[in-house]
Amino acid sequence: MAFSGLTFPQLKLKHGISKQIIDPIMVTGNGAREVRRKQNKTDRGVWTFPARNISETDKQTLVKFLQQTRMGADSFYFQDPTMPVLVDAPMASRSTNTFYFNVPFDAVTPGNHPIVRPVNVGLTVKRNGVATTNYSFATGTDGLPYIQVTGAVPADTITVSGAFYLVARFSGTVQYSIAAMQKLDNNCTVTPTIVELADFQIVEVFE
């Protein structure tokens, strides 16, 4: 699996998207004692999209996106539709001029959720209430994202506003079929008119 660098399209669903938090546990034993281990270091989100609530136009968009991501083999940027847009969310001091991307994920301790490949698109960073462009995102060896603000000190108040993106992939095979087509044109191409799409899931990844 490779990272495509593409962004999952914003679908016009008014309702129906559900989110789960998965944290699978592996259980082993020798007959006398049972051992339980987390399969993943961090829990991750899984979003289910009901096909019945997706418009025909969005289905066409999804088919194109699938083709661009090698039929779902590649990961991509994804905006969690269940998370509100950040409004002056405070960041936690990390060290010197760096601050953890202090965003709460499903009641876990803010700043303890990895966000790989953080992007600056659409985000506003403020230092002590004043917007600044002298910052960059990075990910530490612990996998946790942080913001480096030029000239900042631990006592500064760093806030972030805007929407942020996770890295995700399709969970399993996305099934769709073209139920109707237009006639062949002079270039011998076809244009799908109806796409039958099965419900599908998107899962957060750390890569």
Image (tube, rainbow, N blue to C red):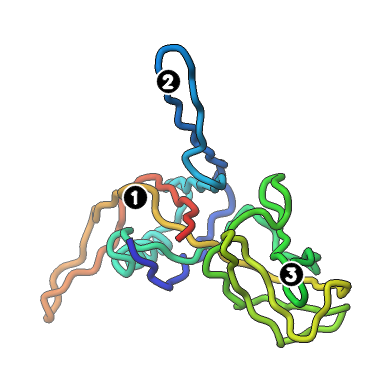
Q: Nearer the viewer, mark 1 or mark 2?
A: 2
> Taking the image as drawn, is residue 98 in sight?
yes
> Which residue sits furthest top?
32
> Taking the image as drawn, is residue 17 in sight?
no
Q: Percent x, y for residue 44?
A: 54, 47
Horizontal side of 16 relative to 185 (left or right) equals right
Q: Nearer the viewer, mark 1 or mark 3?
A: 3
| Front residue of this view, candidates 107 and 112 | 112
**Mark 1 or 2 closer to N-term?**
2
Q: Residues within 10 Å of mark 1 (few under 14, many from 20)?
A: many
Q: Percent x, y for residue 100?
A: 71, 65
Q: Which residue is mark 3?
A: 99
Q: Nearer the viewer, mark 2 or mark 3?
A: 2
**Which residue is rendered at x = 45% and y = 26% of the image?**
27
| Front residue of this view, candidates 206 and 21 | 206
Q: Amino acid at mark 2?
A: Gly
| Front residue of this view, candidates 168 and 85 | 168
Q: Percent x, y for residue 56?
A: 39, 59
Dots 1 and 3: beta carbons under 8 Å?
Answer: no
Q: Percent x, y for residue 99?
A: 74, 69
Q: Which of the numbered marks, if any, corresponds to residue 29?
A: 2
Alpha-carbon span between mark 1 and mark 3:
43 Å
Q: Amino acid at mark 1?
A: Leu
**Which residue is rendered at x = 12% and y = 80% of the image?**
187
Q: Amino acid at mark 3?
A: Phe
Q: Which of the numbered marks, if any, corresponds to residue 84?
A: none
Q: Which residue is mark 1?
A: 197
Element type at mark 3: strand
